[in-house]
Amino acid sequence: MSKHRIAILGSTGSIGQSALSVVDTHADRLEVVGLAAGENAGRLAEQVARYRPRVAAMSTARAAEQLRAHASWSTDTVLADVGRDGLVAVATHPDVDIVLCASSGTDGLEATLAAIECGKTIALANKEVLVMAGGIVTEAARRKGVPILPVDSEHNAIHQCLHGRAPAEVKRLVLTASGGPFRGRTASQLEAVTAADALRHPTWQMGRKITIDSATLMNKGLEVIEAHWLFDVGPAQIDVVVHPQSVVHSMVEFVDGSLIAQLGVTDMRLPIQYAFSYPERWSAPVPPLDLTQPRRLDFDVPDTEVFPCLALAYRALRGDGSQAVVLNAANEVAVARFLDGALAFPGIAQVIERTMDAQGTAGVRTLAEVRALDSWARDYASEIARGLQLKV
């Protein structure tokens, strides 16, 4: 049996570690060829010692030096350049079949495009890639005949529900949202919440930034934009419902009124494995969902007055593509300030909206234009955030 040879961008994060757990379960089917990480040199060194990839990379020169100095560092693994160049080197290694894009932020964009140009299958966990450059990325994938397999649990669920169905049969996609830790609170109640409060997610264990995005519902907004590019549907065909139990991961409604849903336990190893094994299905390293246990399934309309980030994402999607770049950049700036204790929770949406209102550039057709607009938006959002800064 030939193995699927994989590269993991963001191997030391929560998605990357879950992916390596899937590798452990299916060591006869999966082989790690490349690993790339941010600044956690110790953990990457341990991963390199265990999985013996052909190539590895770190985000900074300092982290790369720490990796080389680590006791478990293996000289059998080539250490690539740092930063975006390192990600590209790992993603385009000639022995790689599947690239799991799980690096945080926008740094994985160039690596994803480079992997597509090399004909690699893309397992996409990084939201920013499609939010910033959905048109560029999907056009490149179509041109090269490269599949983009979603790893986000919601998009992965929709991919499963759509399997074998014609686009004309689809009426709408329904993304489910847990509602985050502040579900049911009023706007005034959110004024004093802290980062520690927001990081207490009720159902998922995720990284810090994505957990804050879940609390603001921006995570769901970014997923709406992703769904547009992944499944070629318009904003009017994408709905969001709050489903606090996180058992139904998403649904598809067809033109005959049938609603097909994907249910499962809240474990990211399931969608990761689906992307690695597709179009096959393998035995899972997680317990099955026990439907005999007492449970209820609730579905509610999201409150976009209290959580305006979702509405801002729909606004960006209805635009010309450039507003999504601004939305994403301003959100990253605002979330970072909130995590540092320098911005109130409601200030996240305020920073994003004011930055979107100030945007003058229309349309982004090239990667250089995306990067230029992203840089402008970060600078502008930083100025807005400073004006709203809390006294700490």
Image (spheres, rainbow, N blue to C red):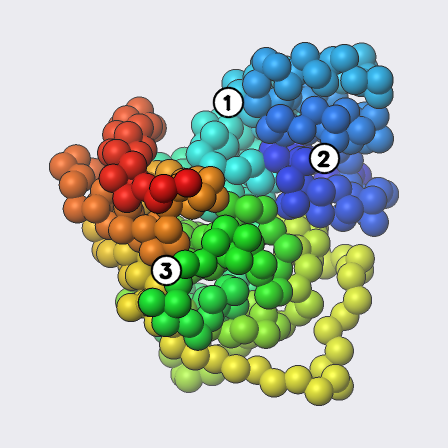
Q: Is residue 324 above or below residue 73?
A: below
Among the two numbered marks 2 and 1 on one chain, the one whose residue lies closer to the N terminus: 2
Write down the quadrant of residue 131 in the picture: top left
State the mark number for residue 5.
Answer: 2
Q: Are marks 2 and 3 in contact (CB under 8 Å)?
A: no
Q: Is residue 224 visible?
A: no
Q: Are marks 1 and 3 in contact (CB under 8 Å)?
A: no
State the mark number for residue 3.
Answer: none
The secondary structure type at the circle numbered 2 is: strand
Report the amino acid beneath label 1. Answer: Arg
Among the two numbered marks 1 and 3 on one chain, the one whose residue lies closer to the N terminus: 1
Q: Residue furthest front?
A: 391
- Answer with left or right where residue 31 lies relative to residue 193: right
Q: Residues within 10 Å of mark 3 (few under 14, many from 20)?
A: few
The secondary structure type at the circle numbered 1 is: helix
Q: Residue at x 57, y 23 (%)?
A: 59
Nearer the camera: disc 2 or disc 3: 3
Q: Which residue is mark 1?
A: 84
Report the amino acid beneath label 2. Answer: Arg
Quarter of the picture holding the N terminus: top right
Q: How far from the left and from the top, in percent, is residue 202?
A: 60, 65
Q: Which residue is mark 3?
A: 191
Front residue of this view, candidates 205 and 80: 205
Q: How far from the left and from the top, in percent, is residue 40?
A: 67, 28
Quarter of the picture holding the C terminus: top left
Give the distance between the C-alpha atoms of the residues marked 1 and 3, in whole angstroms.
37 Å
Q: How far from the left and from the top, in percent, is residue 71?
A: 84, 17
Q: Residue at x 70, y 16 (%)?
A: 66
Q: Residues within 10 Å of mark 1 (few under 14, many from 20)?
A: some
Q: How far from the left and from the top, in percent, is residue 126?
A: 51, 43
Q: Residue at x 75, y 42 (%)?
A: 20
Report the amino acid beneath label 3. Answer: Glu
